[in-house]
Image (cartoon, rainbow, N blue to C red):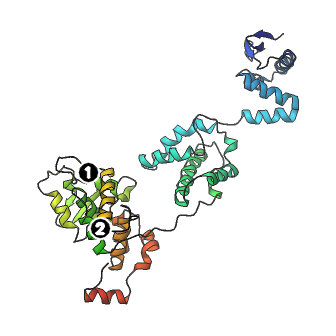
Amino acid sequence: MPFKHGKGFWTWARLRDGGRRRVRLGTDDRQVARDIEAMLQRLAGRRDWDLLEAAVNGPSTVGALYDAWVVGPEGLADFRARLADVDLNDHVEAWQTWAKRRASPASVVKYASQLRALVPAGRPFLRSQFTRKVINEALSKLEASGSTARRYHAAWSSFAKYLVEVELVDVNPLRSITPPRNNPPRSNYLSLSETKKLVDSHPEPYRALAALREGAGVEITPALSVRRRDLDEKDRTVHIRGTKNAWRDRPVFVEDWAWPYLDKAAKDKLPDALLFMDEGGRPASYYGARSAHKTALAAAQLDATYTMHDARHSFAVRCIKAGIDPQLIASNLGHQDATMVLRIYGKYRPKAADFRRARSGTDDQ
């Protein structure tokens, strides 16, 4: 007979090994408690140990089993299917270890954060939920631009590839889901005279940093890490130690107008010293660079929407207008090949009129 303990009823259930376990029935109704106890006795008599042992895990499981029992064979079949399901949250950590062998640590950290939009931490996310319908709904709910949503798609696809590899799922549902469209390519850029005006409007050490950004198309984070030994005065190149992928670690050429700023910043510095440091010996920072950039835009009376990242566009447009090999431009920007350069900047490739202006010395690229 079920017995009252606290506010609800309990009973004793037989186990596969012949022992017994006290089970909370999750109800304060005596008749319901008797019905659940009778169900547990029937399961033990039928030696249906899988269902019985699942029920003793907690009152919520007992209640779910009882609901299935009341429905009949179809309900029990559905309950058995749920028992065989897998909580994919238990495999997120192993996936991150797997992913670190295929991508940079920084990329994996971003992937893990993006995965949580689909597989929330602390809540079960069952294998049976990992379907095209659920994934499409999650993608549609993202408050992100197309390009950002594509990165979520890539993160979720990485997780799916791992699940297929360890045989937790049979197919990667992301393969049949078209990634969101990229944002239209941004090509906000300045002319050379505007670029020089912007750079000269910066205080040091951010003036030299802006010269590297604008005169070589280097992204801000690795630019801040450049050391004196990374400069090659003979070739006028700078070694950029990007970490996102193999081709981000590369030498970049610096336009002639920008090199004197770097040369001045390198004066009297030891080889291992950071190139961009203020007079007090403090290294330049991202937030300092952003603040100096905004102030310089205002001082130079230039478009306030021009970002530090737009320096890469200005550099690429000038170079491709000058007829420089797109692969060399791509290498400077840290791209694997020239595909993106040609897709975004191909419309700026020089025409006959450009060559005539360059020959006459009136071109302002």
Question: Where is the C terminus found, in terms of image quarters?
Answer: bottom left
Instruction: Give x and y (percent) for residue 232.
Output: 19, 62
Tag 2: amino acid: Ala
Looking at numbered disc 1 in the image, what kind of residue is underneath it? Ala
Q: Does residue 26 sit above or below 111 in this rendering?
A: above
Residue farthest to the left, as pictured: 268
**Which element type, helix, strand or loop, lies under badge 1?**
loop
Q: Which residue is tagged 2? A: 300
From the image, tell me which residue sits under label 1: 284
Image marks 1 and 2: residues in contact by CB distance under 8 Å:
no
With 82 as the anchor, is 298 left or right in this view?
Answer: left
- Is 88 drawn above or below residue 336 in the view shown? above
Q: Is residue 94 above or below residue 20?
A: below
Residue 359: percent from left, percent from top: 27, 88
Q: Position of residue 13 (x, y in %)?
A: 77, 15
Q: Is residue 79 left or right of residue 215?
A: right
Alpha-carbon span between mark 1 and mark 2:
21 Å
**Res 77 visible:** yes
| Circle 1 or circle 2, nearest the eye | 2
> Image quarter for residue 9?
top right
- Label 2 environment density (alpha carbons within 10 Å; few <14, some 14–19, many ≥20): some
Task: Please tell me the numbered disc located at residue 355.
Answer: none
Q: Quadrant of residue 83?
A: top right
Q: Earlier in the sequence, mark 1 or mark 2?
A: 1
Q: Residue at x 36, y 89 (%)?
A: 353
Which residue is found at the position 40% from the left and 55% from the top? 245
Closest to the observer, 283 or 166 = 283
Q: Secondary structure at mark 2?
A: helix
Residue 113 place in picture, x, y as percent = 51, 44
**Looking at the image, which is closer to me, 47 or 12?**
12
Circle 1 packing at 10 Å, graded few (<14), some (14-19), many (20+), is many
Q: Quadrant of residue 320?
A: bottom left
